Image: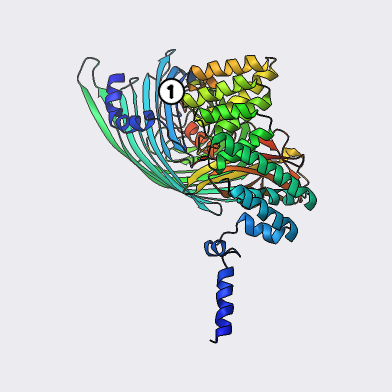
Amino acid sequence: MIRRALRFARPALALALPALLAGPVAGQRSALVAEVGASRFLPPVGVEGEAASYLLVGLRGDRLGSGGSGVTASLLAGWASGGGTGGDFLSGEVAGLMRTDLGRGWEVGGEVRASAFTVGDPVPYRAGALEGEAFLRARAGPVRATVAGTGGVGRSTVELRRFVRGPSVEVTDDLWRYGARAEVLAGSAAVAAGLAAGYHESAGGSYGSLGGRLAVGVAGGALEFRLDVWDTPVGNETTGGVALAIPFGIWSVRGFGGRSEPDPLTLAEPGRGGGGALVGVRLTGSDDARTVGAVSRGRALHRVLEATPAGARVRFTLPAPDGIDGTDEVALLGDFTLWSPVPMERAGAVWTVEVEVPAGTHHFGFTLDGEWHLPEDAPDAVPDEWGRRSATLVVED
Amino acid sequence: MNRMWTGRLARALLLLPALGLPALLSGQETAQSRARSALPPAVFQELERMGGEVERSGIPPELLFNKALEGAAKGVPGDRLLPAVASYSRRLLQAREMFGPQAGPPILVAGADALQRGVPEGALRRLGARGDRSPMAVLVLAELVEAGVPVERASDMVGEAMQRRVRQGEMLAMPEEVRRLMRQGRSAQDAAEQVQRAMRRGRGGGVGPPVPPGSEPLTEERQRLMRRRPGAGGV
């Protein structure tokens, strides 16, 4: 089965592997992560049977620029046990991502994703798909709205035998879907909540969904709760659950629990319930935003978004827990602003602003209602000649 | 146009460069032009004199105007600006002498900062002699020394990191990793040794910082998490 699946996924892997394995360059981050885990799931809605347990082994990698554009790839194998209705499976996916910051809080981007899946039991089933999405995202203060148009085509093949020892017959189906989704989230990087909706036409009929999201930043990672009501060609379903992804240095944990969603492309039915978790270890690369000389670390006050011809575009962030909750005006000052205050905007629990910084070694800090301020634990702080401190930012050529 | 007006116009044109015409044409204000408008005339004149002195040593006078503007922005009284700029000027000249005539403003500023943070001149000179003229290397050296790592050990770590072409992200994380181990009770020397060993093992030995919580990674990651394939059960 694995040999057959690899043959199936070979073209996508041939495209992705050179990009993933090449050494990263400035402004990019890359990582190759090996994962192992387990999951247990009840059969999908409409299928009678026992729960299936899986031992999961996977490999995933990404190579992304500081702006979030790049390529990701993953391979996940599952061995079924316990006499459930699921079989051993292998799935692979390669995705290319593109994002462009239009300024003034607007962002446009897209994703093209090729995926393949094969499972041996209860009947041999293979599916391959090419999907794409184009999105427009707007941000105004703590509110972020996304609208996206999606579409995909694919093909699935089922091998059926009329007799146990008889010849197999391959039944092939063309898969397609197109539609749109929208999402509105409000909050900060620490907590955000909102609504999501989607509508898709597919080979199996129309799918509509409406749901809620609650995303929480925890321990350097993310935790999300979701609840959706689906109108599918075979009836109404409620799905939902919790998903998490938490890194610990080179280690990471990600998992999912709840009722999984239907898939308009492969026409998979919603799951009845289940969950699983994967523990990963980073084999190469680093997950930090390795950029043109300035990285986010510790209690970072700045993050390089992208390299520019003269230096870099940098987002400066000042967390609210520094006792600035009652502050009316927060501003960024640095040698790159000629020490003129640049007003920062409140975004949930932080104050933030984006500015262009030329290549060089720079000093900066903040004013709270006109008073100089630098957090106690600011990294790379250098004492000035007047008993105060400034933060340092190095943007290399 | 009579001769008198022609003469006035010529004088005006000759004065324009001094009044910051390049900055006006490029649409960008310089530290010098801003200092001219923001600082008392006497302070500005003294700054111009000091700027001329450092310029003869190849140091851009803009660095001194910027330092004065920094002080003004921090609310420092005018009489305390010039002594601070003079002190900064001396450190820049020291850095120029340490790193050589080829050193650009980024390494000079980093060197002046390192001196201010207590890095001995000899350590910076050794770094420069090895050809490690990266402002990042100087910054990390200063961070390590400030964290309490003995100067020799810190110089050795930074030199080795540069030699091994350790990623900037991992190099910048070294001081914080040393501090973390020190908070766990290790001595600065032990902590530095451990981080250096991790660096030798490759991939930074887990020294790299975790992904900070942020809205973009959160959105991408949760989309990836929730993507489902039949049989895989959503994981």
- Front-most of residues A382 and A322: A382
Q: In the displayed orientation, state which residue is furthest to the top.
A: A82
Image mark 1: chain: A
At label 1, the amino acid type is: Glu
Q: In the displayed orientation, state which residue is furthest to the left.
A: A167
Residue for point 65% across, 49% down:
B64
Does B4 sit above or below residue B235?
below
Residue for point 63% across, 17% down:
B191
Q: In the displayed orientation, state which residue is furthest to the bottom.
A: B2
- Front-most of residues A340 and A113: A340
Q: Which residue is mark 1?
A: A48
**Image x and y of residue A134, in percent:** 42, 47
Does A244 sit above or below residue B8?
above
Q: Determine whether the residue tagged by mark 1 lies in a helix, strand or loop.
A: loop
Which quadrant of the figure has residue A393?
top right
Total labels: the figure holds 1
**Image x and y of residue B134, in percent:** 52, 34
**Image x and y of residue B91, in percent:** 65, 39
